[in-house]
Amino acid sequence: MRGPLGDIVVLDLSRALAGPHAAQMLGDLGAQVIKVEHPGGGDESRGWGPPFVGPDHDISTYFLAANRNKQSIAVDLKSDEGRRLVERLVRQSDVLIENFRTGVLDRLGFPVERLHELNPRLVILSITGFGHDGPEGGRPGYDQIAQGEAGLMSLTGPSKDEPYRVGASIADLLAGIHGAYGVVAALYARERTGRGEVVRTSLLAAVAGVHSYHGTAWTVGGTVPVAGGNHHASIAPYGAFRCADGMLQIAAANDGQWRKVATLLDIDPDDAKYATNRQRLAHRDELIAQMEKSLARRDREDWLTALADLGVPAGAIRTLDEVYTWEQTRSQGLVVEVEHPVLGTIELPGPPLRFDGAPQARHTAPPALGQDGEAVLSWLAERER
């Protein structure tokens, strides 16, 4: 076994990001992932860039981000031959992942009922834009559309009048994460029931599922949260502050931490305006201005050292090149090295999970289109014997 899911086979019919990310997570846990792609170009994210890399500048780094630890087989799902091959693969798989628009898989001849006729133990993960049912079920959705519709953009940006998208494709990625843990739960349930089930999530559900305290501000408190820039909606001081040579972040989440920050910055911690979190929030603009006046006296690294000595959570705002060359990032296994058939040795963002006592996982590079066709067919024939 290559990991906790080393005896699991995943048939990945998805494309773009949400489904492939879910499949990649399962592959990181040791599952064998067979990615089915259309012969005429494959997963559309193969064409998403820049940047493109390789001798012919035709390999998308976007595709590389979501498809490690997979095999690729080129199959035309609209052909009789392709559908017969998928039927064979379904019979030998534990999980099927799809993120087609609602009804597409049915029209291809693979409704849920048919899939479970072929393999009653099959766990099916279906990811949609806004859900498979309801008044807007089946509506197409991409990440930024979902960020807006699910309220995330209203919480992001400098003010309520300037909604921003989150820089990462967070709706897609969260849908993949939710989908992967749903699959693991369904696999666990299968050990009791002997049958697979359908796991459903959507970009809408993924974003709504992380509203957390913003959601209860409305559902319980009757308050509509709005964007507050780089400062926390409920805690002060907690956010990004200007210092002599740029910006740093400080998070004083309790009164004890606040007193340390205030003393360091020559602010009276017992000032009636700042004595409690509720009072600090009520006077936040004034507090930020006073803090930044003090912070302007020294450089970022000086302040970060001083705050660390006091045990106050603080940090820099790093660019991605700084993140991936940071020794702490590398110490956590968040950068992995793989051998790509065209690019040679490359580094990829690594999985966010570690298992104590387990040997270091070995990862494979995202595949070229159809590169594993013969290997998969050979494996399939062996399984069918």
Image (cartoon, rainbow, N blue to C red):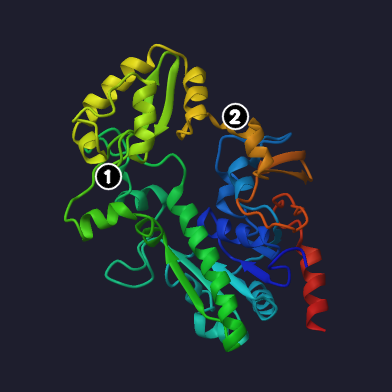
Percent coordinates x, y for residue 186 in the rendering: 55, 76
User: Does residue 67 appear left or right of residue 319 in this picture?
Assistant: right
Q: Residue at the spot x=59%, y=71% of the render? A: 96
What residue is drawn where x is 37% and y is 37%? 256
How many neighbours does mark 1 have within 10 angstroms: few (below 14), some (14-19), or many (20 or more)?
many
- Dot 1 amino acid type: Ser
**Dividing the image into 4 quarters, which one contains the C terminus?**
bottom right
Please, which residue is most extreme toward the front here? 270
Which picture quadrant has residue 130? bottom left
Residue 120 appears in the figure: no
Label 2: which secondary element: helix
Give the CA distance from mark 1 to mark 2: 29 Å
Query: Could you tell whether 200 is left or right of 69 in the image?
Result: left
Q: In the rendered image, which residue does mark 1 sit on? A: 154
Task: Identify the residue under disc 2.
Answer: 321
- For the point 40% across and 17% down, which residue is it? 243
